């Protein structure tokens, strides 16, 4: 057990402390360990779990406060607790867009590498996948208490109340993040833990120093005498991110040697892949998802669209510029502003229009706030924007964290005109179902419409989610727009007729 404890400490990024007289926090951890199963828990070699779960798309559902779009999964997971390895086999369905369960997807991981495998083909996982596996190995119920006990500077915090129940709290470090362990004051079973710092997952980092909480419930007593929670709920900044229900738990399950095939070649491939892995926060302007160079599109004099994963635009209106949308990160906005300055000879940016409440579509707004640039937005999105601007980024500061300033909000609830002259724009609330929190941007002199996220042309030429097309057509007709061309957050300029034809095709398709 001494080797395992040191491994926990080192992988967590913590130097082991010199032996000292047992502290009150350590004694509390020992009592909690006894409540879970004592020596039976400490001597576990492996655990096999089966379960069902769902994840809420907090970052891009119709409303920031829910209800959220869900993706579902069913899984089995085998953890080797002595050699710190796991094997997870998952089938998934992406909510409304996946009628069938996906084929098995296998994640193989340990503290140094992670590998995906499907249908006999293996490929390197992402750094975030390995990080999630490390968290599962060290902070899951069977190992959480050991991880806390091994951490130096383990200390007590004042008791608090969780769901009406008093809890003891113990603070420790887990890698780059501060961790707080919660113990039910009556049972001493772990209620869960909270991590403070850069969050994991694809989009959590957009909140800077986030609060990621994991709560345990529905405890069961299973052979050989260990208590284990059957429900696990994960929250991000107080919102429900994921919920898992375990349908089967087996302790000391057989773990054949070939259960975790991570040869040196796979480790080398993982290391090389991670070294090449693009940073979403530092995504380059003027590059596609595949990394190909994409040139700006001059759709009219003084109207430039910058393509790539996110189609932003800069519009010159006399002696000022207006930027359309601030996606993905403050650093992406910094690049766009630098390009605007280069192209337009230092003409100042008078405003930025943010057209959606989806996190990836507004995460760059912090750079504009830091520069004192007014933010034009739909009235319904004020709350999510204020939360983004108020977030703290102390672990990896951006410009707003380094120099805080109050935002200049320009909310609108009805159609409004921004600027004058041939490049004036009109900001129009969509007021649809999927587009409830979206703005359209209309350039009447050019008969050019920006449809926010409502038009997404796919590789085969069809359009994602025809409901969105119906909504943008309805909004254009309601407002009397004579549209010739349209572009959107993920789609370059195309004829308006393509949108009308796509909706007509759906209407003409016979019911099977």
Image (tube, rainbow, N blue to C red):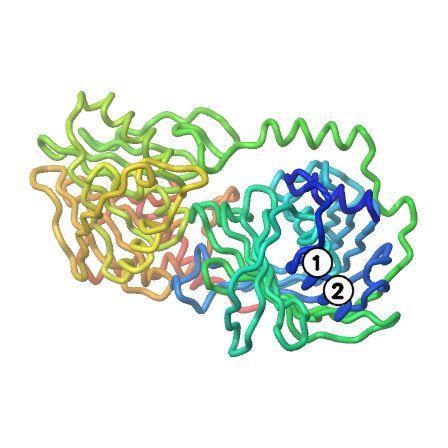
Of the numbered discs in the image, which one, if any, rests on residue 33? 2
**Measured along the vertical axis of the image, is residue 452 above or below residue 112?**
below
- In the image: residue 131, left or right of residue 318: right
Give the mark nearer the N terminus: 2 vs 1.
Answer: 2
| Disc 2 element | helix
The answer to whether 165 is drawn above or below residue 416 in the figure is below
Q: Position of residue 26 (x, y in %)?
A: 69, 57
Residue underneath mark 1: 145
Q: Is residue 370 left or right of residue 217?
A: left
Residue 353 in percent (x, y) is at 24, 46
Q: Which mark is residue 328?
A: none
Q: Which is more toward the observer, 492 or 233?
A: 233
Question: Residue 35: x percent and y percent?
Answer: 75, 71
The residue at 55%/48% (across/down) is 200
Question: Relative to residue 410, is residue 163 drawn left or right?
Answer: right
Q: Using the image, determine if residue 189 lies above or below residue 359.
A: below
Q: Which quadrant would residue 337 be assigned to in this image? A: top left
- Nearest the eye: 376 or 478: 376
Crowding at label 2, few (<14), some or many (≥20) Cα neighbours within 10 Å?
A: many
């Amino acid at each position: 057990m001494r080797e395992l404890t040191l491994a926990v400490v080192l992988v967590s990024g913590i130097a082991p402390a010199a032996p000292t007289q047992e502290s009150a926090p350590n004694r509390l951890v020992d009592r909690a360990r006894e409540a879970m199963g004592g020596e039976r828990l400490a001597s576990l070699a492996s655990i096999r779990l089966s379960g069902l779960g769902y994840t809420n798309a907090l970052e891009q559902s119709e409303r920031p406060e829910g209800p959220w779009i869900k993706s579902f999964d069913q899984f089995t997971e085998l953890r080797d607790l002595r050699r710190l390895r796991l094997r997870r086999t998952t089938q998934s369905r992406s909510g409304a867009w996946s009628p069938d369960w996906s084929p098995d997807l296998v994640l193989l991981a340990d503290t140094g590498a992670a590998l995906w495998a499907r249908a006999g083909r293996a490929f390197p996982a992402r750094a975030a996948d390995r990080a999630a596996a490390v968290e599962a190995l060290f902070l899951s119920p069977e190992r959480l208490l050991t991880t806390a006990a091994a951490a130096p500077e383990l200390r007590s915090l004042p008791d608090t109340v969780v769901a009406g129940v008093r809890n003891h709290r113990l603070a420790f470090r887990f890698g780059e993040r501060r961790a707080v362990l919660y113990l039910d004051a009556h049972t001493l079973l772990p209620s869960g833990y909270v991590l403070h710092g850069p969050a994991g997952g694809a989009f959590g980092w957009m909140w800077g120093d986030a609060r990621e909480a994991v709560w345990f419930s529905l405890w069961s007593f299973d052979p050989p005498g260990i208590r284990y929670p059957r429900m696990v709920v994960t929250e991000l900044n107080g919102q429900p991110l994921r919920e898992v229900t375990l349908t089967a738990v087996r302790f000391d399950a057989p773990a054949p040697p070939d259960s975790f095939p991570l040869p040196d070649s796979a480790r080398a491939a993982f290391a090389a892949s991670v070294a090449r892995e693009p940073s979403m926060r530092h995504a380059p302007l003027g590059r596609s998802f595949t990394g190909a160079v994409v040139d700006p599109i001059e759709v009219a004099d003084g109207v430039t669209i910058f393509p790539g994963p996110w189609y932003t635009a800069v519009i010159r209106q006399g002696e000022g510029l207006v930027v359309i949308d601030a996606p993905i990160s403050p650093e992406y906005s910094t690049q766009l502003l630098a390009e605007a300055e280069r192209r337009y000879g230092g003409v100042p940016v008078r405003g930025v229009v943010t057209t959606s409440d989806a996190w990836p579509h507004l995460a760059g707004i912090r750079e504009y706030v830091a520069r004192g640039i007014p933010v034009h937005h739909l009235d319904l999105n004020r709350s999510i924007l204020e939360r983004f601007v108020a977030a703290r980024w102390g672990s990896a500061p951006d410009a707003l964290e380094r120099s805080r300033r109050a935002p200049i909000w320009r909310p609108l609830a009805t159609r409004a005109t921004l600027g004058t002259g041939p490049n004036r724009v009109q900001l129009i609330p969509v007021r649809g179902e999927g587009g409830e929190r979206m703005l359209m941007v209309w350039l009447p002199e050019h008969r050019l419409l920006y449809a926010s996220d409502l038009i997404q042309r796919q590789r085969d030429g069809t359009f994602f989610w025809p409901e969105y097309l119906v909504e943008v057509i309805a909004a254009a007709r309601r407002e009397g727009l004579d549209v010739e061309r349209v572009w959107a957050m993920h789609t370059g300029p195309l004829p308006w007729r393509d949108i009308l034809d796509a909706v007509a095709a759906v209407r003409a398709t016979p019911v099977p």
